[in-house]
Image (cartoon, rainbow, N blue to C red):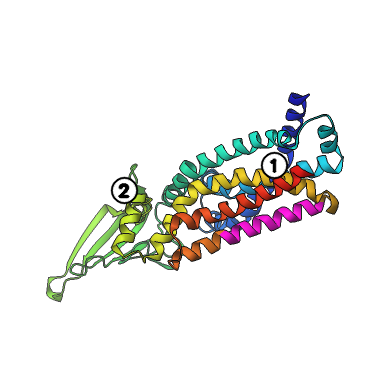
Amino acid sequence: MIRLFDRYIFFELLPPFLTSLTGLCFIIFTKEMLRLVDLVVSRGISLAALGSIVLHLLPSFLVLTLPIACLIASISAFNRLSFDNEVIAIRAAGVSFWRINLPVVVFSGIVFLLTVYLSQWGQPWANVSLKTLALSVIEDELTLAVDSGVFNEPIPGLMVYVPHSENASGDKGIFISDQRNPEQPLIIVAENFHMLKQSERQQFGIRLFKGAIHQIPKDANNFHRVIFDTYDFWLSSPFSSVKDKTKRKTYHNLTQQLEESGGTDAGALRRLVEFHKDTAFPVATFVLGLLGVPVGIVSKRSGKAGGFAIGVLVVIGFYLLNVLGEFLVTTLVISPFFGAWMPNIILAFFTGFLLFQAGKQ
């Protein structure tokens, strides 16, 4: 009997959990849709590259949506069980209220472990690598963005112009002004070109055909011109320096940065709060799963929609507490550790109170 109702309750939790998780991920995904569409339309990346970016976004999406989905699943399952009087039937069979919670504890524990993995390893990896991946995709797909009929500046100090149409011989032509070295500015013209890129993506460039290099010295009498049939114009990747900045700071780096500022660096304080939330947020997933039991049972009186509405209010309140905690940390009222764990502490007391009240009924 006990094993049967354990499985029954556990599988009652799965459908609303998967449905709400899918819906929540889709809602968050629509927020990023415009950026992704811009990559496809203006940057010309392939659908395969777009799919790779979406996969890198998933860990961040799931860390946000798993706690909410766990709460909604618990509320929906026990709202239905209570509405159909199945909770009363189970308790009439001699099963205590606390024993009924065991399947929810197991289910919430599984979601908790998944959230721990994503918050400790998945999300930090995604945050660090996503920008690098996006830049690498742009390099792979475009090598160098050169629009016809406009003056392109792919990197500071370099201007490239390509006319709209080809000439009678099929050559398109290209004009390059290289001002990266003010002491030796160069003007390069060629009849035709195509793009180049080294396999390790440290350099990219243009292979020029039938053109000339004009060096413009300070003394006009020392003008130089070099005529070529083929010339490879190489450039360092403009994304290399950006990739170097994407590395995540460690806890030691953050505390050291905070000490150097006398404990007032708001950026370091926020990062420390996020560091502690990597542990606090998964714990909130477990607590929210347990909170759904009394909320689902009590909301029977207000109908199935009432349970969902209460769940939404709980989630909004939880995230407002997170915002408040971060504000109190940046204003030096509380420590980063307490700012990250304060919402969990309040939520745990609230959950314990409701469970105790539901257990007495």
Determine the CA span between mark 2 and mark 1: 45 Å
Residue type, mark 1 in image: Phe
Where is residue 167, by image quadrant?
bottom left
In the current view of this chain or complex, which residue is farthest to the right? Answer: 84
Horizontal arrangement in the rendering, residue 173 relative to residue 318 (left or right): left
In front of the other: 248 or 104:
104
- The circle on residue 17 is 1
Q: Earlier in the sequence, mark 2 or mark 1?
A: 1
Task: List the residue tagged with mark 2.
Answer: 202
**Residue 94: x, y in percent?**
80, 29
Q: Which residues are magenta?
A: 305-321
Tell me, yes or no, whether the highlighted magenta stretch contains residue 319.
Answer: yes
Q: Residues within 10 Å of mark 1 (few under 14, many from 20)?
A: many
**Quadrant containing the C terminus in the rendered view:** top right
**Residue 155: x, y in percent?**
34, 62
Where is residue 285, by image quadrant?
top right
Q: Which type of secondary structure does the marked residue at label 1 adopt?
A: helix
Q: Residue at x 74, y 55 (%)?
A: 310
Q: Residues within 10 Å of mark 2 (few under 14, many from 20)?
A: few
